[in-house]
Image: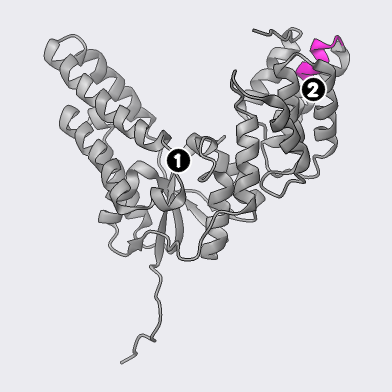
Amino acid sequence: MSSIPPGPHPAPLTLLPDLGDLLRLHPQFNAGTVAELLAHLGAREVLWASGPDEDHPLRDALPAAGVSLRDGFSADWAWADAEHGQLTGFLNQYPQGRERLQQAQQADAALAELVTAPLDAARALHPDFLAEVQATRDALRAALDEGPGTRWRERRLTELAARLADQRGVALVPLDDLPDLLARLPGAALPDLSGFQAGEVSRVRALADRAWQLREEDDLNPLLAALRRETGDRVTPRAELDAAAASIYLAVGDLEGARTELERAAHGLTDDLPRSLAGLVLARLGQVRDALGDRELAQRTYRAVLALSYAPGVARDAAQAGLREPFILALT
């Protein structure tokens, strides 16, 4: 009989929580943090069991960090959204139905409050936090029952668990699915955070995320200075920092300053990673050239966006709109 050697034995499958676009919100738990956490775990591949969003921040960050993504674990549940919409319309016709919808909205609001409050990896993986997340999903099911009201959540999770049951490695799953999946996958576990601390990749990613989300009360000069101090890395290259700086110039109506930064960013595009960056930089550069009256060069820039092997939807939409009519910068 073979014996199990002494020492730690990591679970065959590690479940890593995904926040989707909310990764852009959290300075201490962003796409760079996830890349660092995977490096800490020694993972070079992630099983993608999260949402289908092609513009998900981790679809940029992880391949840029050298982590491959393996798809095929998430099905298309768009039909469940349609059924949920039909149920909502039906319930809205009746007082008791509206009361149930209000309870469901309160459950979703509670989840939103949890995931938009300050968050780091330790909190996102803490049992108490996950229990709070699970409580909001239980409340949603109590309000609308399992089925169209929950977008067939039990069925979806059962099918997802079946696809993951024989897998090994690290799987990325939506944060609000994590507690239920742990219960359905006895051999799965949360990542071991022993010795983990978010580092420079996370910090630089947080800086860029912040610069892309300017607020009216921001002091722009320190933010611009911080962007200029950084050299960038694989997840957040220098070209993206330049493009983020351009957004600050645009916010104050300085088109020439924005063009300088964007042209520097465009010249700094060295390969196809992160995959969204070229499309975003060139689409914005086309708009700035348009706003400065250089229509012919703007059109060439828009066409360059559409010729890319991949460009995010917002960049393609901007390029197509720019080809139809010149972009005009509207400052409020």
| 43 over 141 or under it: above or below | below
Residue at position x 60%, y 40% in the image: 206
Q: Is residue 121 magenta?
A: no
Q: Which residues are magenta?
A: 286-293
Horizontal and vertical percent position of residue 282: 76, 27
Q: Is residue 115 above or below residue 81?
A: below
Q: Upstream in the sequence, badge 1 or badge 2?
A: 1
Q: Residues within 10 Å of mark 2 (few under 14, many from 20)?
A: many
Q: Residue at x 78, y 23 (%)?
A: 285
The residue that mark 1 highlights is: 19
Nearer to us in this view, 57 or 71: 57
In the structure shown, which secondary structural element does the residue marked by tag 2 occupy? helix
Q: Which residue is mark 2?
A: 258
Q: Main secondary structure of the magenta part?
A: helix
Residue 287 on the magenta segment: yes
The N terminus lies in which quarter of the figure?
bottom left
In whole angstroms, how far apart are the C-alphas of marks 1 and 2? 31 Å
Q: Position of residue 331 (x, y in %)?
A: 68, 8
Residue type at tag 2: Ala
The image shows residue 332 at horizontal and vertical percentages of 64, 7
* Circles 1 and 2 in contact, beta carbons < 8 Å: no
What's the residue type where badge 1 is placed?
Answer: Leu
Is residue 321 left or right of 108 when viewed as pictured? right
Q: Is residue 108 visible?
A: yes
* Relative horizontal placement of residue 146, taking residue 204 as reference (left or right): left
